[in-house]
Image (cartoon, grey):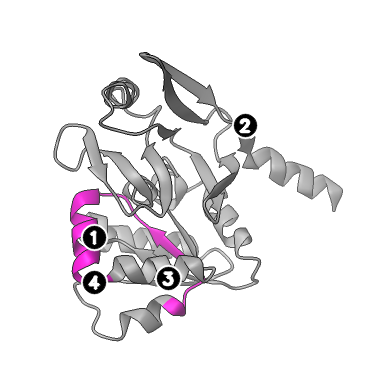
Amino acid sequence: MGGGGFSMEPENLLLDRYVLNSTRKSNPTVCFLPTASGDSEGYIDRFYTAFSTLPCRPRHLSLSEHSSDLLEFVKECDVIYVGGGNTRNMLATWRLFKLDSMLYEAWKNGVILCGLSAGAICWFEQGHTDSDGDLSAMDCLGFLSGSCTPHYDGEAERRPSFHTLIQQRQLSPGYAVDDGAALHFIDDDLAYVVSSRPTAQAYYVSTEGDAIVERPLDTQFLGQARCRTSRST
């Protein structure tokens, strides 16, 4: 998710419902990872406020407090939902606890990995981040190929910075995601692009020669999908 979900749109949980529906389970276990926010208590509270209204079993993992077997904890989850914040600090903490390798194994075993902002870019080879202040490129987990930037329509400097870094080959070609839009990968292939806002969209950004090519991706507004489903039942 480029942005959105419970933390940015508490009255619009279309993306969060989409994640739950993707598990194909009636009452999935959803674990919130607030590492990027420094395990913010307010962020955790907002997660429970939202997900307690949805058909799931919400839980969270604060690495600063967790003392039990992390691997078993992760294996018990159907969804790992990663919050926004400082991507660089988050990945350093995950690697300290070896959580990065646990998440990779969970993904390969069918656990859905998702998140917004830091929780979106972390899965790619490279992320476009302001973790160090100014927007820059950073190496991420590499579960998915290419690069990714969130908040594409929500922050004025995102688009020009992403274009420049790709042109300078500091970032590989990749995905730009508006607030309210989400990329749905199955294994490592992009299967769908969905949105919780009618105008939210995602793009694939690359180069031809020295020129930037920004290709809009077909995006399904989930509000329309929900209306069609309601009329057909």
Instruction: Tell me, yes or no, if residue 46 can be seen here.
Output: yes
Lower sequence index among marks 3 and 1: 1
Lower sequence index among marks 1 and 4: 1
Residue drawn at 31 percent across, 50 percent down: 84
Q: Quadrant of residue 36?
A: bottom left
Residue 38 in the image, given as x and y percentages of width and height: 20, 59
Instruction: Please state the extent of the stretch shown in magenta in the rendering.
Output: 75-98
Lower sequence index among marks 3 and 4: 4
Lower sequence index among marks 2 and 4: 4
Three-letter amino acid code of the residue under disc 4? Leu
Three-letter amino acid code of the residue under disc 2? Asp
Residue drawn at 42 percent across, 70 percent down: 105
Q: Is residue 68 left or right of residue 3?
A: left
Q: Which residue has dot 3 on it?
A: 105
Q: Which residue has dot 1 on it?
A: 40
Q: Nearer the viewer, mark 3 or mark 4?
A: 3
Within 10 Å of the Cα at label 3, are there few (<14), some (14-19), or many (20+) other Cα atoms?
A: some
Picture layout, residue 24 above or below residue 180: below
Instruction: Tell me, yes or no, if residue 86 can be seen here.
Output: no
Q: Gap in Å between the C-alphas at discs 1 and 4?
A: 12 Å
Q: Nearer the viewer, mark 3 or mark 2?
A: 3
189 or 62: nearer the viewer: 189
Lower sequence index among marks 3 and 2: 3
Q: Gap in Å between the C-alphas at discs 3 and 1?
A: 26 Å
Q: Which residue has dot 2 on it?
A: 218
Three-letter amino acid code of the residue under disc 1? Ser
Residue 98 in the image, given as x and y percentages of width and height: 26, 71
Picture layout, residue 16 above or below residue 134: below
Tell me, yes or no, whether the two marked residues, 3 and 4, touch with CB atoms within 8 Å: no
Q: Which residue has dot 4 on it?
A: 63
Looking at the rendered structure, the secondary structure element under dot 4 is loop
